[in-house]
Amino acid sequence: MFAAGLENPPKISIVTPSFNQASFLEATIDSVLSQRYPNLEYIIIDGGSTDGSVEIIKKYEKHLAYWVSEPDRGQYEAINKGFAHSTGEILAWINSDDMYQSFAFRTVASIFTELPQVEWLTTLSPAFWDWYGFSLGYCTFTGFAREAFLDGYMFPPGYKGARGTPQQESTFWRRSLWEKAGSRVRTEFKLAGDFDLWSQFYRHADLYTTPSPLGGFRYQDKNRSLSFDDYVQEAERSLEEMRKSVGLSNTIFKKMKTILRKIILRLYIYRIPGISVLTKPILDYQGLRIVRQKRNTPQGYWEIEMYKFQ
């Protein structure tokens, strides 16, 4: 038995887009296959690498459901191509320089199996690695919520008071949600395709979180996502499209609320006795966190906890 309650574990489809990342690709593949998940569908879409990546892929091809190495128009086209070949109930992609935690698939499968209302899931404890794969530790997010997303607080930290965006390496979703969102990552985005996908998901379902680390991002000198300004410009465009689609453009009221929120946080007004009650409606969001109950017994189970965060 793979895990309690997982006698018939759901199929997980993982796609890895890759192009000339031979220095890191094998570690990524190992982080997927070493989970020994019994119902895994692993797909690698290589963009025609010439650095030895193909030889690495061939080394593991008996464990792959599908792979190809051919020129494409970038990462997001490769991801779409990979998911078009997938059949799993649970989906995710991991880039060819990033890695999963060793218990990620077991955790994800258990949560999705026990809690059918969960359509997508991410971690509150994203991990980070250096060039060699040494751990740089974890950061802690207080929470995610659709309202916070619409308010512009789910951008990378350091952007206009934002608290962080769901880590792509640690986010999983059901095929049914993927289909509702159009069954694709939009290729008109070059860097913020993940942010735009979260935007599409939020139109259909709430995001649930777990304190359990699931994956990690590797810092290396060719990271595309380190082009911070370009990423933010694309993310802003995606967010404004979502706001308009739900009838909530960046109005004067919303701008004033954003300014007021920043003032309250920057000046620590919320710490003044008697004032915190007044600031809570401006600062607080409601999150959905999945926690483990009866954790010290064989009868342990997952439970959804609604909570407030800032």
Image (cartoon, rainbow, N blue to C red):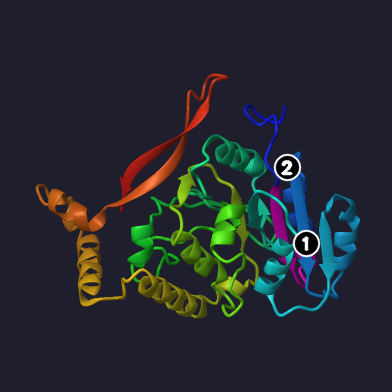
In this view, 273 is above or below 190: above
Residue 308 is covered by the magenta coloring? no
Tell me: 277 left or right of 81: left
- Quarter of the image holding residue 95? bottom right
Using a 10 Å C-alpha cutoff, classify the residue at mark 1 as few (fewer than 14 neighbours), some (14 to 19) or many (20 or more): many
Which residue position holds label 1? 44
In this view, 131 is above or below 136: below
> Considering depth in this image, is 189 or 248 the residue closer to the camera?
248
Residue 139 lies, in percent from the top left, at: 48, 52
Per the image, label 2 sits on a secondary structure element best described as: loop
Checking the image for residue 294, the label placed there is none
Total number of numbered discs in the rendering:
2
Q: Could you tell me which residue is drawn at 77 percent across and 47 percent down?
A: 33
> Considering depth in this image, is 220 or 151 the residue closer to the camera?
151
Amino acid type of the residue that numbered disc 1 sits on in the rendered structure: Ile
| Residue 96 visible in rendering | no
Residue 292 lies, in percent from the top left, at: 49, 31
Tell me: 245 left or right of 82: left
**Of marks 1 and 2, which one's residue comes earlier in the chain?**
2
Q: CA distance from mark 1 to mark 2?
A: 17 Å
**Label 1 vs label 2, nearer the camera:** 1
Dots 1, 2 in contact, CB < 8 A: no
Which region of the structure is painted magenta?
Answer: 12-25
Q: Could you tell me which residue is drawn at 40 percent across and 45 percent down?
A: 288
Residue 273 lies, in percent from the top left, at: 11, 47
Amino acid type of the residue that numbered disc 2 sits on in the rendered structure: Gln
- Quarter of the image holding residue 4? top right
Checking the image for residue 35, the label placed there is 2
In this view, 189 is above or below 284: below
Residue 171 lies, in percent from the top left, at: 56, 54
